[in-house]
Image (cartoon, helix red, strand yellow):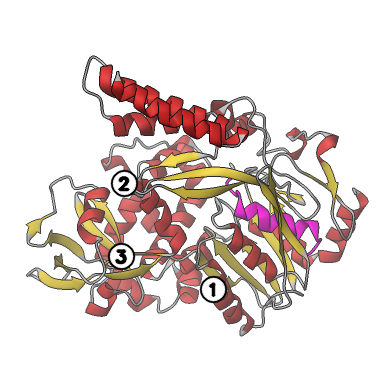
Amino acid sequence: MEKILKPLLIWGLALVLMPLHAQLFNEQSMKFSQALEYVKSLYVDTVNDRQLTETAIISMMKELDPHSSYMTAKEVKEMNEPLMGNFEGIGVQFNIINDTIFIIQTIPGGPSEKLGINAGDKIIKIDGKNVAGIKITNNVVFSKLRGQKGTKVTISILRRGEKELIDFTITRDKIPIFSIDASYMIDNETGYIKLNRFSQTTGTEFEKAIRKLQTQNIKNLILDLTDNGGGYLEEAWRLADQFLDNNKLIVYTQGVHAKREEYRSTAKGLFEKGKLVILIDEGSASASEILSGAIQDWDRGYIVGRRSFGKGLVQRPLMFPDGSMLKLTVARYYTPSGRLIQKPYNKGTDDYEKDILNRYNKGEFSNKDSIHLPDSLKCYTLVDKRVVYGGGGIMPDFFVPIDTTDYTNYYRDIVRKGIVNKFVLNYIDQNRVSIKAKYPDISVYDKTFNTDTVVSQMLVYAEKEGLKPNAEQIKISKPSLSKLVKAYIARDIWDSNEFYEIYNKDEPLLKQALDVIHNWDSRKKELLKTK
């Protein structure tokens, strides 16, 4: 009894001396601690109090909003790696095909590239232990190849044309994770940049990319934010600052316990005058919506695609001593016109998570008229006074329906089962030298590489992998399969930049973006008529 009464007396004295709001908080804290102590002291079986605490915290977060969450120390580390812009390892991209680890690319400037490890090499041993033919998983490979900077790992490589294994002892180092997937000129005046996340290095990467495009006389820019789930708010602000002139409001945040905080542009943007089109879709969220909203509200450029995800809540990381963390929603963010673009979550987490599926089922991906937003969410852009909406993501200025023309069950299965990727890796392994000799650069490859024979070989390979052929569906999907195979080969011979140069050919969103750029004035008149 003394074990319980003593802490109660201490809490009671403390409560008398505290302000009312602190008392209410600590009464509940005491209640939770007391309940945990009861369970530990009196429960019929032995309990794991650490696990009980974490379960309680997780349940508490579920009562708040869909984006407040608890993360273990391991989950925090995994989350931070792509946002911090680096991890520590040997610097290779790999894939496991036929139970063998294939190196797809070495990271430029990384330790593996410096030692002469090549794309197409197969890792047979790691630190003397066999890793081929043992059903190894991606997670196991990561655990063996990643490690603290300065530590060493020895890998044994099987290289085509070599009879013996080649050993490389690699000193692990910091390996960059890039947030820009591609940056190139689509035509003589129009550049394209594909951004996959907003990490700590995004601003620096963008400046490097746009300066390079400026040496190629860029006048127009297409910024691709499709499937970009966001990241750091500050990086969205930095990127918007590249497009807006001085002292323009980009975004502001506010909450019950967080006073209004404004983020404004400075006078140092690198692309404040050229025509700008931003591509978005239902996978564009958070920081992507901050940037898109600012550009749209200031009528600085146009948004092309489909309605974005709809995340307008700001999370603050709150660390625990053991490395775990709360991601707690502390404020809402608003676009310059005052739009809150957070979609509703009052029907619960399950309904919230099904929102994208519900949009698809209602026909929203294929028909703009299927989207209904109430007049109460109506706002106006700050220059042209066009109507824009809050409450459910960023609505594009020019809607582009999802393209399902070539999509069949056969296409879905050959991609979903990884058959296309596995076939291309095997094809590259056998033909890398001849492809490089025949196609010295992406321009020659794009113009002269014929995929007919390669696709025919892949269809045979797919049947051997257990995918039954369907002549009618193959005929429908062949153009998309040909483009995908050609793009994958380009990626494995060169890099992701070349992948997008091939893959973006005739993509509907990109075609619409180019149409807007080439008909800028008439497109603007169309929008102003509907304001």
Residue 254: image x %, image y %?
70, 48
**Measured Cα–Cα span from mark 3 to mark 2:** 40 Å
Residue 146: image x %, image y %?
25, 60
The local secondary structure at tag 1 comes to helix
**Magenta span covers which residues?**
283-303
Q: Residue at x 42, y 56 (%)?
A: 80
Quadrant containing the N terminus is top left
Q: Point out the tag, 3 or 2, that comes first from the N-terminus.
A: 3
Q: Can you identify the residue that label 3 sits on?
A: 88
Residue 350: image x %, image y %?
54, 27
Residue 289: image x %, image y %?
66, 52
Q: Can you identify the residue that label 2 sits on?
A: 460
Q: Is residue 233 above or below residue 220?
A: above
Residue 204 tag number: 1
The local secondary structure at tag 2 comes to helix
Q: Residue at x 50, y 28 (%)?
A: 28
In the rendered structure, which amino acid carries the disc numbered 2?
A: Val
Relative to residue 494, is residue 48 drawn left or right?
left
